[in-house]
Structure formats: structure tokens, C-alpha cells
Image (tube, rainbow, N blue to C red):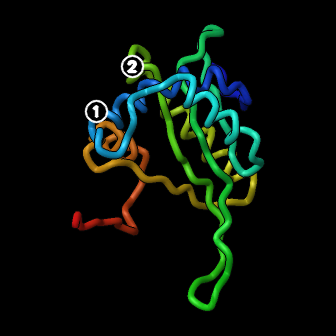
Amino acid sequence: MEITQTKDSNLVAKLNKPVHDLHYSLYPHYFKEYNYKAIKEEFKKLIEKKQFVFLLVEDNQQAVGYAWIEMKEYPESAFKKSYEVVYVHQISILSTQQKKGYGTNLMNYIYKLASEQGIDKVELDYWVDNITAKDFYDKQGFVEYREVVYKQL
């Protein structure tokens, strides 16, 4: 297994399909159906921004998943101290390749990358009904420290 940085928006868009389809199935009110062309164009724009990093997971030279992370800096204000985090926007592993350790290896790579940058916190969020993500991040040792709620009007 190998993890490398990628700028290939075509490949990232293809690997995005499992996580996007899951989001669409859970929350069709918020998410559009998967559209490879539109998603590829969106990733093409994101990949060019220096704060975003896209990590590719390959096994036997076959792409099996990716992570989209951001080096994020929260500035100091009158209310809060400044701090930096590595923010995980998405992890997507092909459905046929899940439960084989690729997600865990990706997270370990992200922890190492954060540490090398002098960053001691990794943040992420996931949709409440995404039990697979909740269970995975629980196993990774993530703890809740902020909760987002809404009221539909």
C-alpha cells in the first residue's frame, strides 16, 4: 500500500463516488446526485488551492481511495486564541476495498503529516446518520467537543 499526494482531479472525482452516493442517499435534500463531470471540475478548482491536500491510497498500483484535507489556521481574536489544525474534509474508500485498513492507514498518514507540520490537532465532521463514519472515527479516538444543531423552519 502506498499513500501519495495527488493533483489528479479525474481520479479524485471517480474515487469520490462512494462517499458522495452515501451522502446523497442519506440526505437527498442537501446533496445532488453524483455527476462525474461537475464534481471533477469542482475538484480541479480545489486542488489548485494551496491549503488543500489530496492524498491518494493505492494498493498494487490500483487506486482504492483518497482523503481531502486542509491545513487550517484559526486566527486570534478578542474571543479566541489562534490555533492550527489539519481538517479532514473527506475520506472515501471504494466499497469493495473497505474494512481492509486503508482508512486507518490514511488517518495514520494524516496524523504524521500534522505532526511534521507542528500541528497537534486533527478536526473533522460527519453527517449524523453516517454510522460507518461515526464508528470509524470513534475507533480512531476522536471525541466530540462541539456540536452543530439546526431547526427547520
Give the mark nearer the N terminus: 2 vs 1. 1
- Residue picked out by circle 2: 95
Q: Quadrant of the C terminus?
A: bottom left
Q: Is residue 101 above or below residue 74?
A: above
The reply to whether callout 2 and callout 1 are in contact (CB within 8 Å) is no
Asked whether residue 75 appears in the rendered view, the answer is yes
- Residue picked out by circle 1: 25
Comparing 90 with 151, the one in front is 151
Q: Is residue 82 above or below residue 41?
A: below
The spot of residue 6 in percent (x, y) is 72, 29
Label placed on residue 147: none
Comparing 120 with 146, the one in front is 146
Q: Is the residue marked by circle 2 packed among few (<14), some (14-19), or many (20+) residues within 10 Å?
A: few
Q: Quadrant of the N terminus?
A: top right
Foreground mark, 2 or 1, reads 1
When asked about the image quadrant of residue 27, the answer is top left
Badge 1 amino acid: Ser
Which residue is found at the position 57% from the left and 39% from the top?
Answer: 108
The spot of residue 102 in percent (x, y) is 50, 26
